[in-house]
Image: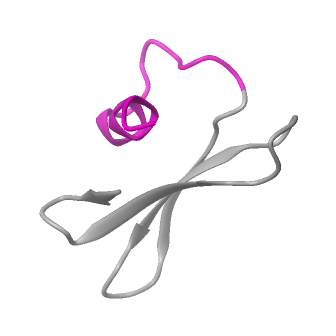
């Protein structure tokens, strides 16, 4: 999913069991901005991009 007016992309990666990761990447630089554990339940203080990514399913 695109984030920050298309300047970033958020996606899930990993196997379906035990190691899903949510990643946020800056498109211009290719730099990874965040790498969070998506296997577990969403934390109350999760960033907005992670909440939107999980809602997009």
* Farthest front residue in view: 57
* Residue 52 picture location, percent across and down: 33, 35
As for residue 42 lying within the magenta part, the answer is yes
- Give residue 9's quadrant in the image: bottom left
Residue 21's place in the image compared with 3, above or below, is above
Q: Nearer the viewer, residue 44 or 19?
A: 19
Give the residue displayed 22% in from the left and 72% down from the top.
7
Q: Nearer the viewer, residue 54 or 27?
A: 54
* Residue 50 picture location, percent across and down: 42, 38
42 sits left or right of 49 in the view: right
- Give residue 3's quadrant in the image: bottom left
Give the residue displayed 34% in from the left and 42% down from the top.
49
Of the 4 image quadrants, the one containing the C terminus is: top left
20 sits left or right of 8 in the view: right
Of the 4 image quadrants, the one containing the N terminus is: bottom left
Residue 16's place in the image compared with 28, above or below, is above
* Farthest top residue in view: 44
- Give residue 37's quadrant in the image: top right
As for residue 49 lying within the magenta part, the answer is yes
7 sits left or right of 45 in the view: left
2 sits left or right of 55 in the view: left
Give the residue displayed 64% in from the left and 35% down from the top.
38
* Farthest right residue in view: 18
The region drawn magenta spans: 40-57
* Residue 42 picture location, percent across and down: 54, 20
Residue 56's place in the image compared with 26, above or below, is above
* Residue 51 picture location, percent across and down: 38, 30
* Farthest left residue in view: 5
Give the residue displayed 30% in from the left and 67% down from the top.
8
């Amino acid at each position: 999913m695109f984030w920050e007016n298309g300047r970033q992309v958020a996606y899930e990666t990993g196997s379906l069991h035990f190691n899903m990761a949510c990643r946020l990447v800056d498109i211009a630089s290719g730099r990874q901005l965040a790498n969070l554990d998506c296997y577990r339940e969403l934390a109350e203080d999760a960033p907005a991009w992670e909440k939107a990514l999980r809602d997009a399913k």
